[in-house]
Image: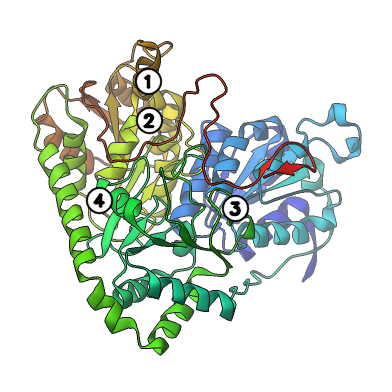
């Protein structure tokens, strides 16, 4: 549908066509036209303290919604703050659309006068483009939304010279989504997978974020129950199959449950559903060892063999694959025999899970001060319901968060999954609360991470968002302190002096308090939940409480000379157009 309108009006109409619920935007001379148009349209807007904080809000909002329901619109050079959040959305396959308003289009080709080099965004997005004519705005944004919501999903960036928002033209306004088809597995891949499952003595299913996007929870449950296969999840897959289910044994990896890691270590077949097979944080290996027989299913062919070579690589939608495997397995008539032969295996796995849950329950009773971090998790999780969202930052405290939470729904835990970027939790918590105003949102941050984006409290106060922010406070970057002490006998650059976080909260118009005993936590959290706006709880934690030995060595962060760590990865790029095995 072509209409004669301004570029700014075309942007607004296209956003409405794609069901945009909220615009996160930053004002500057390049965004005056679009800011006015968005405001006049009645679309809800949020104006963050920084572009990067706002981009993390967009990422969190869209992760919770499962679609690009929030859009970011940014002023010229402020767009240069976006790449960490855009790369996070792309790595974690979170659909997000960002629009940057650049210099005058008359300056095209004069690179020295371009305030934002568009090439910056190519490596950190699924797709990026520059609009050169006002009549191309609608179709370019259409491509952007399709790319963001594609399979795989991710961040996109559209560069629009700001003068085009004031120009008028005959502009084609797209009329919504073109739904991508689900990729169906080949018959040979299904047969090979079924044969491997039947031959396995100790199989496991690994559930990733791609399974969540595919809405494959019920199908995975059917497969697990049909063939008595224990289910392990990644952080992005956590809760898709409820962790209260007897066959679900928790998350694996460096910040995983011991029950899951031990079961994965002895498995002979792993069915990997929609995961890149990397622990949270792009640089961290998933585990010390994966089974020799690896069935890896993903819609993105580039994920297959990226970290570990699969025995059976399957390019397919997870739900389509699992449905096909279930049907083929039933047809073999082997299901009853498989369940009978795996009774002892499933019983052993169940005992491990009970032991892990008993461990974290026992740790949660600790009354010491400074506080045992497991006690903080006990107090948080006992007031969470199935719809509550826990947002954790990066640092040692994230391990306690990931290990101490039992989820029954997906998209209930949120962090910098793909990049392990420090300091993203506060803006992500704001985005999550805006996406689900009726859900309790808990933000867990270390004291080092809190320093990055605590200024976004301004937004939480303006929006009257009752989020609970808990600061795990030990006056240090303790993860690095521990690693450096292990190698050098001491840490460097790891200690600092903290401000009064409760006083900072009050200065912004929020509420806050600092606990002086472990027994203070329950009351503090109740007061936070009763507040009408954000509430900061500053908790001194015992620096002597170390991370639990969950039987995974984790990544080799610190290298001795040229002892480069290796895994089962196959191909590593070593320059443009070249690679080696």
Judge left or right: residue 374 versus residue 10. Answer: left
| Residue at x 58% of width, y 78% of height | 188
* Above or below, 175 relative to 410: below
- The residue pinned by badge 4 equals 259
Viewer-nearest of labels 3 and 4?
4
Viewer-nearest of labels 4 and 2?
4
The disc, 2 or 3, on the residue closer to the chain's N-terminal end is: 3
The disc, 2 or 1, on the residue closer to the chain's N-terminal end is: 2
Viewer-nearest of labels 3 and 1?
1
Q: Quadrant of residue 312?
A: bottom right
Q: Is residue 246 visible?
A: no
Mark 3 and mark 4: span between their CA atoms? Answer: 32 Å
Judge left or right: residue 66 versus residue 446. Answer: right
Q: Depth check: 266 or 86 in front?
A: 266
Mark 3 and mark 1: span between their CA atoms? Answer: 31 Å
Q: Are marks 3 and 1 in contact (CB under 8 Å)?
A: no
Residue 75 at x, y = what percent?
67, 35
- The residue pinned by badge 1 equals 477
Mark 2 and mark 3: span between their CA atoms? Answer: 25 Å
- The residue pinned by badge 3 equals 154
Packing grade of label 1 (10 A; few <14, some 14-19, many >=20) is many
Residue 303 at x, y = what percent?
58, 55
Viewer-nearest of labels 1 and 4?
4
Say which element carries label 4: helix
Q: Which mark is residue 390?
A: none
- The residue pinned by badge 2 equals 395
* Above or below, 286 relative to 147: above
């Amino acid at each position: 549908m072509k209409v004669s309108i301004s570029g700014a009006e075309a942007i607004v109409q296209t956003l409405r066509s794609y069901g945009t619920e909220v615009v996160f935007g930053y004002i500057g001379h390049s965004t005056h036209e679009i800011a006015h148009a968005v405001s006049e349209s009645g679309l809800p807007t949020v104006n963050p303290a920084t572009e990067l904080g706002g981009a993390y809000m967009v990422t969190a909002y869209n992760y919770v919604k499962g679609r690009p329901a929030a859009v970011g619109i940014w002023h010229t050079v402020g767009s240069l703050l976006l790449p960490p959040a855009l790369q996070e959305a792309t790595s974690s396959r979170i659909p997000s659309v960002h629009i940057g308003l650049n210099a005058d289009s008359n300056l095209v080709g004069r690179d020295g006068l371009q305030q934002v080099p568009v090439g910056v965004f190519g490596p950190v997005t699924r797709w990026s483009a520059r609009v050169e004519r006002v009549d191309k705005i609608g179709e370019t944004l259409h491509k952007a939304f399709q790319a963001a919501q594609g399979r795989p999903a991710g961040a996109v960036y559209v560069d629009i010279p700001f003068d085009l928002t004031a120009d008028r033209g005959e502009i084609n306004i797209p009329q919504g989504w073109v739904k991508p088809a689900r990729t169906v597995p080949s018959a040979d891949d299904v047969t090979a997978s079924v044969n491997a499952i039947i031959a396995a003595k100790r199989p496991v299913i690994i559930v990733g974020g791609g399974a969540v996007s595919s809405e494959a929870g019920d199908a995975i449950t059917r497969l697990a129950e049909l063939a008595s296969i224990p289910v392990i999840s990644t952080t992005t897959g956590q809760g898709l199959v409820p962790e209260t289910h007897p066959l679900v044994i928790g998350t694996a990896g460096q910040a995983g449950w011991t029950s899951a890691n031990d079961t994965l270590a002895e498995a002979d077949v792993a069915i990997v559903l929609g995961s890149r097979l990397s622990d949270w944080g792009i640089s961290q290996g998933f585990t010390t060892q994966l089974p020799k027989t690896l069935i890896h299913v993903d819609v993105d062919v580039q994920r297959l063999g990226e970290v570990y070579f699969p025995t059976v690589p399957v390019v397919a939608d997870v739900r389509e694959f699992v449905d096909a495997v279930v049907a083929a397995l039933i047809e073999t008539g082997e299901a009853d025999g498989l369940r009978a032969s795996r009774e002892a295996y499933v019983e052993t796995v169940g005992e491990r899970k009970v032991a892990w849950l008993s461990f974290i329950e026992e740790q949660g009773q600790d009354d010491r001060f400074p506080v045992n971090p497991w006690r903080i998790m006990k107090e948080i999780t006992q007031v969470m319901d199935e719809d509550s969202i826990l947002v954790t930052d990066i640092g040692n405290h994230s391990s306690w968060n990931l290990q101490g939470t039992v989820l029954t729904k997906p998209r209930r835990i949120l962090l910098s999954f793909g990049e392990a970027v420090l300091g993203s939790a506060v803006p992500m918590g704001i985005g999550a609360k805006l996406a689900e105003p009726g859900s309790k949102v808990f933000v867990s941050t270390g004291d080092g991470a809190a320093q990055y984006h605590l200024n976004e409290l301004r937004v939480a106060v303006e929006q009257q968002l009752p989020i609970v922010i808990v600061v795990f406070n030990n006056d240090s970057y303790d993860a690095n302190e521990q690693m450096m002490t292990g190698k050098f006998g001491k840490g460097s650059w790891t200690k600092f002096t903290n401000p009064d976080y409760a006083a900072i909260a009050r200065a912004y118009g929020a509420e806050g308090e600092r606990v002086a005993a472990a027994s203070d936590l329950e009351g503090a959290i109740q007061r936070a939940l009763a507040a009408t706006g954000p509430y900061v709880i500053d908790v001194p934690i015992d620096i002597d409480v170390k991370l639990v030995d969950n039987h995974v060595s984790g990544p080799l962060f610190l290298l001795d000379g040229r002892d480069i760590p290796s895994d089962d990865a196959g191909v590593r790029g070593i320059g443009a157009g070249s690679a080696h095995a």
